[in-house]
Image (spheres, rainbow, N blue to C red):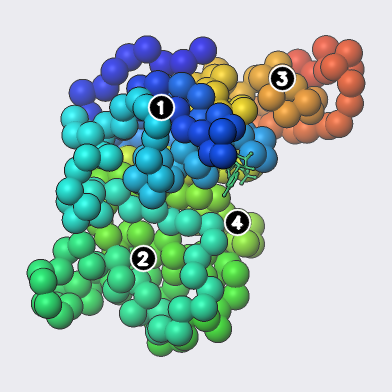
Amino acid sequence: MTDAVQPTSGLSLDRVAFSRAGRVIIDGVDVTLPRGAFGALVGPNGAGKSTLLHLIASIERAASGGIVFDGAALPTMPRRERARTVAVAEQQSDTELDLSVVDVVMLGRTPHLGAFASASATDAAVVRDALAAVGAAGLAARRFHTLSGGERQRVTLARALAQQPSLLLADEPTNHLDIRSQLSALSLLAELARGGLTVLAALHDLGHAAAYADHVIVLAEGRVVAAGDPATVLTPELVLDVYGVRAAVLRHPLTGRPLLAFAEGSPAAAETSPTLDLESSL
Ligand SMILES: Nc1ncnc2c1ncn2[C@@H]1O[C@H](COP(=O)(O)OP(=O)(O)OP(=O)(O)O)[C@@H](O)[C@H]1O
C-alpha cells in the first residue's frame, strides 16, 4: 500500500531507484509527504533508510526517479538554494571537529551568509535559538569533540535547525538520547512540523513513530511496503511481515495514540496478537 495522492506542496518521490556495487539498494520508491507533516521512515536494518535520506538530500544521486519538494526538483536545484531548503541531521556527526559548539551550529548558517560575509547578530540569534530548542544552550561554549554522544546528537540537530530549512531530514534523531531527551527531540520535531516544517525522520523505534509521526513509511529491502497514518500502517500483521516479530497494538492510556508491545515468537503464535484497546483488555 502506498499513497497515490500527489501533494501540491511537500515532498514527493516518484519511482526513485539506486544501486551500489551492482546491488539494488532503493527499488522504485514512491513517497508522498505533505508540507508540515512529520513523516517517520521505519524498516529493518539495511532496508535503505539512510540511503533514501541521502538521495533526498542529494548527498548521493538516484539512478532514476523524481525527487521534488514544493514543486522543485531537489537534485537539479542549485547547491546553495538546496542548502537553504533541505537540512540533514545525520546520526554519525563529525566527532573530530575541533570547534566550539556555537561554531558547529553556526555552520548551519553558511547557506544564508553572503560571500565573505561574517555572521550577523541575526545569525547569532538563530544559533542561540536552535541550541535552546534542543535543550543544549548550556553547551554553547564547549568544544564539540568533548561532548557525549547524546550531547553531540542534540547539537547536530541544532545545526540542522539553524539552517532554517523547509525540509528537515533526520537520521535516527533519538539515537544516544536518554528517554526524556528522546521524547523532547520527538516532540520538538512534531511541533516544528505543526509550524510548517516538513520532517522526515528515520526511526528504529516503532513506538516513537506511532506516538509522534503523522505519517509512517515502511521500507523493506529498498521498497515501500506500507505508508499512511500510524494507526493504519502499524498493525500486528505488518510488524510480523516486515520484522518477523509478534506485536500487539494497544491504545496509549495517556495519549490515545497507538502503543506497540512486542514479543518474539512464531507466526502461528502471532495469530493471538490482536489489536487491543488497553482499557478494554484490563
Ligand atoms: N558504502 C556502502 N557500500 C556498499 N553497500 C552499502 C554501503 N552503505 C550502505 N550499503 C548497503 O546498503 C543497504 C542499505 O543501507 P542503509 O544504511 O541505507 O540502511 P538503513 O535502513 O539505514 O540501515 P540501519 O537501520 O542499519 O541504519 C544495506 O544493505 C547496506 O549494507
Q: CA distance from mark 1 to mark 2?
A: 28 Å
Give the amino acid at mark 4.
Answer: Asn
Q: Are marks 4 and 1 in contact (CB under 8 Å)?
A: no
Q: Please name which of the two marks, 3 or 1, marks the residue nearer to the observer.
A: 1
Vertical placement of residue 278 versus 113, above or below: above
Give the amino acid at mark 2.
Answer: Arg
Q: Are marks 2 and 4 in contact (CB under 8 Å)?
A: no
Q: Classify mark 2: residues with Cα within 10 Å, few (<14), some (14-19) or many (20+).
A: many
Which mark sits nearer the N-terminus, 3 or 4? 4
Left or right of 40 in this view: 195: left
Residue 119 percent coordinates (x, y): 17, 78
Give the amino acid at mark 1.
Answer: Val
Left or right of 201 in this view: 234: right
Q: CA distance from mark 2 to mark 3?
A: 37 Å
Which mark sits nearer the N-terminus, 2 or 3? 2
Q: Is residue 275 visible?
A: no
Q: Which residue is mark 2?
A: 159
Q: Secondary structure at mark 4?
A: loop
Q: Which residue is mark 1?
A: 16
Residue appearing at x 17%, y 63% in the figure: 112
Q: Secondary structure at mark 2?
A: helix
Give the amino acid at mark 3.
Answer: Asp
Q: Which residue is mark 3?
A: 241
In the rendering, which numbered label is found on residue 175?
4
Residue 37 percent coordinates (x, y): 36, 34
Which mark sits nearer the N-terminus, 2 or 4? 2
Residue 228 percent coordinates (x, y): 47, 21
Q: Is mark 1 within 8 Å of ligand 1?
A: no
Vertical placement of residue 145 versus 262, above or below: below
Q: Nearer the viewer, residue 123 or 247?
A: 123
